[in-house]
Image (tube, rainbow, N blue to C red):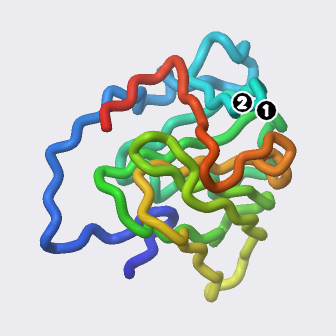
Amino acid sequence: MLLLGCLAQRPESQTTTRQSNLPTTPAATATPSQSLTEGPRACFENGACITIEVASTEQERETGLMNRKAMPVDAGMLFVHDYPALHAYWMKNTLIPLDIAWMDENLTVVDVQQMTPCASESCPSYSPKAPALYVLETNLGVLGRNNATPGSKIRVSNATIIA
C-alpha cells in the first residue's frame, strides 16, 4: 500500500472508466463564507448538513486538509476515489483532529474512525474495515454528534456523483 497524503495505490489489475461530475475546481466548491445551500454539502440521517469541499483528482486527494490550522465546525471534505478499495489515510502535516467516514458506492457508511494530528515523519495510517469509494473527513466529533455509524447513509447534494 502506498500512502500519498490521502491517496491509496490502485491495484495493477484494476482499471477504471468511472466518471465523476463532482466539482473539482476551487471556484466550484463551497467556501466557509457561503451558505450551506450554495455549495456542495453532506447531510446526515438526522437532517444536519455540513458544507463540503470535494477532492476528486489525485492532486486534491493527496493534499486533502493538510496544513490547515482550522476548519469551520459545519465544514468537511469529501474524497471521491476512482474505484472501491481499502483506501488508507494518514494525518501527516494535518494540524486538526478529524473524524473520517468511509462510504461505499451507495454512500452507506462502512467504517468511522477518529484521527489525530501528526507532525512527525512516521505517522500512523487509518484503514477502513471494508472497501469504500467515498471518504468524508470532518472536525473531530461531528460524525458522532450526527450518528454517522456503519450502516447509516450520508446524502451529498449540490454535487453529482456517478457511481
Q: Nearer the viewer, residue 87 or 58?
A: 87
Mark 1 / mark 2, whichever is N-terminal:
2
The structure residue drawn at horizontal position 16% and vertical position 65%, both measured from the top left corner, is 14
Mark 1 and mark 2: Cα distance apart in space:
5 Å
Residue 91 figure quarter: bottom right
Q: Amino acid type of disc 1?
A: Asp
Q: Secondary structure at mark 2?
A: strand
Percent x, y of residue 8: 39, 68
Dot 2 surroundings within 10 Å: few (below 14), some, or many (20 or more)? many
Q: Secondary structure at mark 1?
A: loop
Left or right: where does residue 59 sit relative to residue 101? left
The structure residue drawn at horizontal position 64% and vertical position 82%, both measured from the top left corner, is 123
Q: Residue furthest bottom?
A: 122
Dot 1 surroundings within 10 Å: few (below 14), some, or many (20 or more)? some
Q: Is residue 91 above or below residue 72?
A: below
Residue 89 figure quarter: bottom right
Q: Amino acid type of disc 2?
A: Ile
**Labels 1 and 2 touching (C-beta < 8 A):** yes
Q: Is residue 81 above or below residue 44?
A: below
The structure residue drawn at horizontal position 54% and vertical position 73%, both measured from the top left corner, is 127
The structure residue drawn at horizontal position 61% and vertical position 26%, both measured from the top left corner, is 41
Left or right: where does residue 27 sit relative to residue 58? right
Per the rendering, the mark at residue 50 is 2
Q: Residue furthest front?
A: 151
Per the rendering, the mark at residue 74 is 1
Name the quadrant of the N terminus: bottom left
Residue 52 figure quarter: top right
